[in-house]
Amino acid sequence: MLGTLQTAGRAGLSPSEVFVHRPMAYRLVLALGDAGGALPVPVREAVVRVLALVAVLLVSLLLRAGLLRYRPAPEATAVAAATGVALALAPNWDFLQPEWLAAVFAAGAVGAALRIRQPVPAALLGGVLLALTVLVKYTTAPTALVALGVVAVLDRRRALLTGLLGAPVCLGLFGLTVLIEPREWRWFGELSTLNGASPLSRGFASSDVRALVSTVLNEALAVPMVALLPVSVAVLARLSPGRRARLAWLLLPAAVVVVVLAAVVLQGQWFQYHLAALAPFAAALGGLALARWSAEHGGPPRALVLLAVVFGVGIPIVSAASTEWRLAHGTPVYAVLVALVVVGVLVALKDRGRSWPVLAAISAVAVFAVPVWPSAPYSFDAIHADYTNSERAAAARTDERLFAPVRTQIGADARVVYLAFGDMAYFFGNPTACRYPAPVFVQRGTYIPAVRGLESYRENLACLEQADAEYLVVQPSWLAVDRLPPDVAAVVRSRFDCDRAWPAGELTVCPRR
């Protein structure tokens, strides 16, 4: 996102005009946070991350302030702190993704809807934040529903009013989006075509069930708070007075999980970041369980704390194993994980004991730190299992080092056309006057026939014929010239001489003939 917005922006295109496979609301938010486009990459990334963490802090404080009007201070503090830490220490693949940003907006919406004393202003601000929750990707609408459900548990009147005001605000902001950039309506309709793996396009199959189970298990290993969710629910149900309350604690979290998983299935791509909303939700329930059990029993629950210690120590050990080992031993690792969760639930339902507060603090640190360990993989044995946090950072530094000599040779201001994924544009950095800096439509059109009938596909192809483009930057592993339609490939070869290309790491830079 940042790479494509920067390279198109240097050629005079605004974030509202650029297609980057994300809605305008998301593009604008990230553009606002990227104030250091001319800075060195590490400094630029530090600025973006600091701004994001400040936003998380402010949202956490707002959430606590809202909860304080309905719940005791220890509960409000524990829930807000756990939510904020889960967002701040989210896996690298989640951080700043639309699903992560939606969770930030959703937490803020809960806080705003509950904090402001006057119901109408509270509902209006909460509704605006819920609208942004939806508009950053559209498939993030379930996250807005979860936030509305949390408000409803505490104040049904405010939840109803927030929903009634949030819906027209969302439609109005979407209408404003289309007014600013009419193509946004077309792109909105074409997004589903780009995702040929969605069950909406090909129908639901048994393979989708297996993929969903694998995605959830990978998430439980990548983010142990998600694995602890059933234990947290068991603790809260145990503490609830009456059968109806206990049943509610079983059904409502289950409904949240189903709603989030529905969005994952709808997209059918099985990326871990599609589950980003589960992490702060699970953390919030864990914090609530800890606070309530401590208030009643004088200390943290053993079932939750001891299992958190086991996960906080054990998961980094197995996750640090080689990719080959993880791919070969996924089934036994998942079996142990599920067995431990079942044992934790059984202990929570029967135990009346407590653990030391110091042990609870250690367990929290251990669990929340799992996603940000340098050796933490992007998934245990699913998509991008071969990426770890440290390896990904090293690969980025390598890209910068390999691209620099070629950029120096052609000039940092030379205009180019990219046949590369957006992260390549991020590190290469040369401007492009194309509205589709990362040519997603052209790339998807190589293996999804329906894409080739879209107007945006034809617009994207036209970028290859830009008169002012001095170089063609190709990432063969993502979109080689030979994969283009034969007539298009012939035009590209007639304009750019890839026989005299400069190699630059993953890229090939072809000069204009």
Image (spheres, helix red, strand yellow):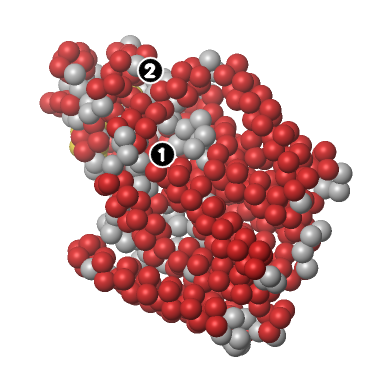
x then y, percent, for residue 437: 38, 27
Which residue, given by chain and number where applicable, does mark 2 sit on?
456
Question: CB of mark 2 within 8 Å of CB of mark 1?
Answer: no
Front-lying residue, 230 or 147: 230
Q: Is residue 431 visible?
A: no
Residue at 17% x, 13% y: name it.
Answer: 487
Give the percent coordinates (x, y) of residue 155. Answer: 76, 51
Residue 347 left/right relative to 265: right
Residue 256 seen anywhere in this rendered image of the structure: yes
Q: Amino acid at mark 1?
A: Leu
Where residue 373 sits, quadrant-wise, is bottom left
User: Badge 2, how many Cα within 10 Å: few under 14, some, many 20+?
Assistant: many
Question: Quarter of the image containing the C terminus?
Answer: top left
**Numbered circle sitting on residue 266:** 1
Q: Residue at x 27, y 46 (%)?
A: 206
Residue drawn at 50 percent across, 54 percent down: 257
Callout 1 secondary element: helix
201 to the left or right of 225: left
Query: How many C-alpha atoms fall within 10 Å of the one at disc 1: few (<14), some, or many (≥20)?
Result: some
Against 306, is 232 above or below?
above
Amino acid type at circle 2 is Ser
Give the camera-side residue of 10 and 70.
Answer: 70
Whether 397 is drawn above or below 124: the answer is: below
The residues bearing labels 2 and 1 have C-alpha atoms spaced at a distance of 23 Å
Q: Earlier in the sequence, mark 2 or mark 1?
A: 1
Quarter of the image with the N terminus is top left
Helix, strand or loop status at disc 2: helix
From the viewer's perspective, tell me whether residue 16 is left or right of residue 414.
right
Position of residue 367 relative to residue 54, above or below, is: below
